[in-house]
């Protein structure tokens, strides 16, 4: 027998539209939806939704009462501003069934994307089971990671935590409900009792289990958690559901983040003007605090790119921040990204758009032959040949439907110097969105020339690798065996003479050494072992 799911929506401020909209848009709707609030005067617009009013002090008891009233096998609780992403009910019910149905699993926990008040991602929470698959208080990273999490994703959620936590405690379970303030999320992952949203077997609310309840963790991002009264809502569930895409965008917005790029930007803008794509296009040059003649270059380019706009992103440095600023200013329904120091091939945009009708995100191809011919051995691996646990579209050549970017929170601005493209692609895929490869969307890619710039880039890649592992290890991102890492360090020592043998060998040694060192430093910062 397939387990069923009911939902209690806890709405202290009387705003429950985001949660209810996401629930009603589910392909398989929950068997019941009840809103618990202490704000009088609102009635639901849909007859499938009940409202239970109460005083704040009685919220825990009312939540428990309404949970027991549902005819479902499991009961989940969402905050009024939390939005269930497409496929949430199916994923939770499937997890219940896989664990043996309502007779075995006591708690089903699943991941969430936490959104800041400005609409940008503030944290990713992917649950991991407690010891022996039981719900318990798991250890979470380092103190530094915990402090970062509290700073990054608190978002004013402390108030609504207590009622659902009290309800779980009454069932003999650790507090784990929606709206939990803070939590060790910014650096990464989640263990039991960390604030991950969950569904609880209803009979446990009547007769608490003598032993800790069995826990099933769903390593997917199924809920978009927004702060109360802050973040803009995601686009309507119907428009963001995977598989519902027009064959061609109405308008493509090309976002070009740039900081002091006056020397290379002209070639890229000329290449964008020579694209073979015949649809409507706008180009946004997003200035991330340039001190050279970047803006003058962009203004002159309007002679051959009349739809070019200059967008100011000088508030703080960072490519992710500049890209998010471009997305916010974009008027198109499909947003493409490229860098100011590369050169798009004529069919680049047409290639991205051709793949967009069957995907939510698209990654193109990179080639170093034109701009960095001396470094052919550093050719980036195509998306289809990547060895990570999920493929990713590189930030230098990618595109996405704008509603997808808004739903998942855009580019994570806490990543600096690399890793934000992997994070965006993985986050979107774990939310249920599809990533496609467009080999015809070719971008001529420029590699770092100087050893100092190269070492800094690879060091940052190493730092971000450890951070990505801390965040996505419970979703399946595996680290290398320590023995493999030790062998790599030994090989570096053996090849130490390469530093004086030739420029090519010296460059190779620096690339690998900087990245391995970044892995170690990132491991210390994130409180994980990522050798």
Image (cartoon, grey):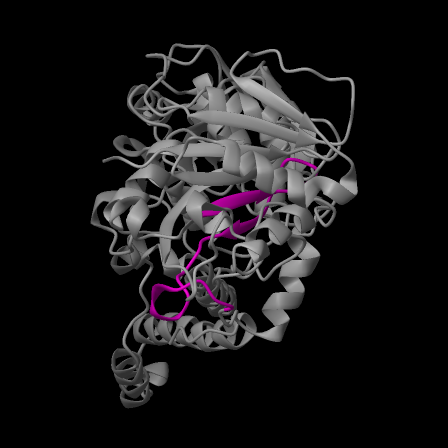
* Residue furthest to the front: 207
Q: Quadrant of residue 119?
A: top right
In this view, the residue in front, 42 or 167, is 167
Task: Identify the residue at horizontal 29%, vertical 80% (top origin).
Answer: 488
Give above or below for 443 relative to 459: above
- How many numbered tags mark residues here? 0
- Is 387 inside the magenta-drawn segment? no
- Pinpoint residue 200: horizontal percent, then vertical percent: 45, 47
The quadrant of the image that shows the N terminus is top left
- Pinpoint residue 142: horizontal percent, then vertical percent: 57, 74
Q: Quadrant of residue 483?
A: bottom left
Task: Identify the residue at horizontal 61%, vertical 59% (top origin).
Answer: 183
Task: Identify the residue at horizontal 36%, vertical 84% (top origin).
Answer: 500
Q: Position of 416 compared to 229: left or right?
A: left
Task: Identify the residue at horizontal 33%, vertical 87% (top origin).
Answer: 496
- Pinpoint residue 246: horizontal percent, then vertical percent: 36, 12
Q: Is residue 433 visible?
A: no
- Pinpoint residue 381: horizontal percent, then vertical percent: 26, 51
- Is 111 inside the magenta-drawn segment? yes
- Give the magenta range: 110-137
Give above or below for 100 relative to 245: below
Q: Quadrant of residue 72?
A: top left
In this view, the residue in front, 197 or 328, is 197
The quadrant of the image that shows the C terminus is bottom left
Give above or below for 149 relative to 160: below
Q: Position of 359 compared to 179: left or right?
A: left
In this view, the residue in front, 101 or 384, is 101
In this view, the residue in front, 3 or 459, is 3
């Amino acid at each position: 027998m397939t387990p069923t799911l009911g939902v209690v929506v806890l709405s202290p401020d009387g705003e429950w539209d985001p949660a209810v909209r996401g629930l009603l848009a589910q392909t398989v709707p929950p068997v019941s939806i009840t809103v618990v609030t202490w704000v009088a005067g609102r009635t639901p617009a849909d007859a499938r939704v009940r409202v239970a009013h109460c005083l704040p002090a009685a919220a825990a008891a009312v939540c428990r009462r309404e949970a027991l009233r549902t005819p479902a096998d499991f009961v989940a609780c969402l905050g009024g501003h939390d939005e269930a992403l497409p496929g949430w009910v199916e994923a939770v019910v499937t997890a219940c069934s896989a664990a043996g149905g309502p007779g075995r699993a006591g708690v089903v926990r699943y991941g969430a994307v936490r959104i800041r008040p400005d609409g940008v991602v503030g944290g990713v929470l992917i649950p991991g089971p407690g010891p022996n698959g039981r719900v318990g208080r798991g250890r979470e990273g380092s103190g530094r990671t915990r402090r970062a999490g509290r700073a990054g994703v608190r978002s004013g959620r402390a108030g609504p935590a207590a009622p659902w936590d009290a309800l779980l405690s009454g069932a003999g379970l650790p507090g784990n409900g929606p709206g939990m303030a803070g939590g060790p999320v910014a650096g990464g992952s989640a263990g039991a009792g960390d604030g991950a949203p969950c569904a609880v077997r209803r009979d446990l609310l009547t007769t608490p289990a003598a032993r800790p309840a069995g826990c099933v963790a769903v390593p997917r991002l199924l809920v978009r958690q927004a702060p109360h009264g802050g973040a803009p809502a995601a686009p309507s569930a119907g428009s963001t559901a995977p598989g519902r895409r027009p064959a061609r965008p109405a308008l493509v917005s090309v976002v070009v983040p740039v900081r002091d790029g006056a020397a290379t930007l002209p070639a890229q803008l000329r290449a964008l003007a020579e694209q073979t794509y015949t649809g409507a296009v706008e180009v946004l040059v997003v200035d991330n605090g340039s001190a050279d003649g970047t803006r003058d270059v962009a203004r002159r380019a309007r002679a051959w790119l009349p739809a070019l706009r200059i967008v100011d992103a000088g508030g703080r440095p960072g490519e992710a921040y500049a890209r998010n600023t471009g997305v916010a200013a974009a008027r198109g329904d499909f947003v493409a990204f490229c860098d100011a120091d590369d050169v798009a091939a004529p069919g680049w945009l047409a290639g991205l758009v051709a793949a967009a009708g069957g995907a939510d995100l698209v990654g193109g191809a990179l080639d170093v032959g034109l701009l960095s011919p001396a470094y052919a051995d550093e050719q980036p691996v195509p998306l289809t040949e990547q060895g990570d646990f999920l493929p990713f579209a590189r930030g230098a050549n990618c595109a996405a439907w704008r509603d997808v970017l808004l739903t998942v929170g855009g580019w994570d601005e806490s990543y600096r110097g690399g890793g934000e493209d992997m994070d965006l692609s993985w986050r979107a895929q774990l939310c249920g969105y599809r990533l496609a490869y467009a080999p015809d969307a070719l971008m001529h890619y420029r590699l770092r020339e100087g050893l100092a710039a190269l070492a800094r880039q690879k060091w940052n890649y190493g730092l971000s690798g450890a951070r990505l592992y801390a965040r996505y290890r419970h979703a399946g991102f595996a680290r290398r065996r320590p023995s493999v890492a030790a062998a790599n360090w030994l090989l570096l020592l053996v090849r130490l003479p390469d530093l004086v043998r030739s420029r090519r060998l010296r460059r190779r040694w620096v690339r690998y050494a900087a990245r391995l060192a970044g892995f170690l430093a990132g491991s210390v910062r994130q409180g994980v072992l990522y050798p």
